[in-house]
Image (cartoon, rainbow, N blue to C red):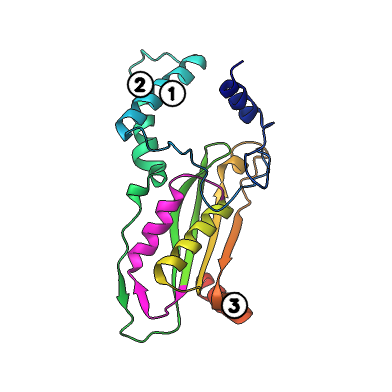
Amino acid sequence: MKEKDLVLEELVNGTRLLDTHSHEEIGDDHLYTGVATPMKPDAFLLSNAEKKQQIAHLFAQIMDVMGLDLTDDSLQGTPNRVAKMYIDEIFSGLDPANKPKVALFDNKYQYNQMLVEKDITFYSNCEHHFVPIIGKAHVAYISSGKVIGLSKLNRLVQYFAKRPQVQERLTNQIGLELQEIIGTEDVAVIIDAKHLCVSSRGIKDDTSATVTSFYGGQFKQAEKIQELYNYITN
């Protein structure tokens, strides 16, 4: 068996360790190896059109293996639809070209309290099973002299959500990106989400949800956390 095929088989079986310093095992443990989304060095050599073509071909093979009749009127367009959906929609956040352009403005109003954008609805996909993660993000920051357009907070959440994700990574990616853009440590992110890999398969628990948080700067203080909590629960 070729080395590449052996690696792929081990990854699929969950017996191969990730090639990182932490050597965390791939499985159902929902561990992740770092803040950056794991990407190959040659991830952008193919054009989007070429990626769609290859995905459609491979997805047609999956459907064929499962015994589906690809000559049926309802199914024959599915491989192309899936390919387009993957590249242009639900995984569009993998492409840096889709990163929202953010403009900052002077804080002329001298507003020096926390600003909270709550209940930002997002749809992501679990990187372990490629099934949806559906949730809401609450994003807050305290200006250090610059402010960001409110819609850009939503767009940044959507950008990082639109890729195969782990909720812990998603939370940190949003928080760290906002800190860099706004130029302040005073950023908080709370995500409350349902994972269909939990509710629709495996344990099949449709009642549980997962909450993760990112607190930087002043938001590490208990009183600021309580103030933020009061805002997002009212």
* Viewer-proximal residue among 193 and 152: 152
Q: Nearer the viewer, mark 3 or mark 2?
A: 3
Q: Is residue 40 left or right of residue 16?
A: left
Q: Which mark is residue 226?
A: 3
| Alpha-carbon span between mark 3 and mark 2 | 52 Å
Q: Secondary structure at mark 1?
A: helix
Residue 64 locus on image (x, y percent): 46, 15
Identity of the residue drawn at 32% across and 35% down: 48
Identity of the residue drawn at 48% across and 38% down: 40
Disc 2 residue type? Answer: Ser
| Badge 3 vs badge 2, beta-carbon distance below 8 Å | no
Q: Nearer the viewer, mark 3 or mark 1?
A: 1
Q: Residues within 10 Å of mark 1 (few under 14, many from 20)?
A: some
Disc 1 residue type? Answer: Phe
Q: Which mark is residue 74?
A: 2
Residue 128 locus on image (x, y percent): 58, 38
| Alpha-carbon span between mark 2 and mark 1 | 15 Å
Q: Earlier in the sequence, mark 2 or mark 1?
A: 1
Q: Is residue 27 above or below residue 5?
A: below
| Alpha-carbon span between mark 3 and mark 1 | 48 Å
Quadrant in which the N terminus is drawn: top right
The region drawn magenta spans 141-166
Q: Is residue 232 above or below residue 169?
A: below
Q: Secondary structure at mark 3?
A: helix
Q: Which residue is mark 1?
A: 59
Q: Earlier in the sequence, mark 3 or mark 2?
A: 2
Residue 110 locus on image (x, y percent): 36, 87
Identity of the residue drawn at 49% across and 41% down: 39
* Viewer-proximal residue among 203 and 60: 60
Residue 159 locus on image (x, y percent): 40, 52
Q: Earlier in the sequence, mark 3 or mark 1?
A: 1
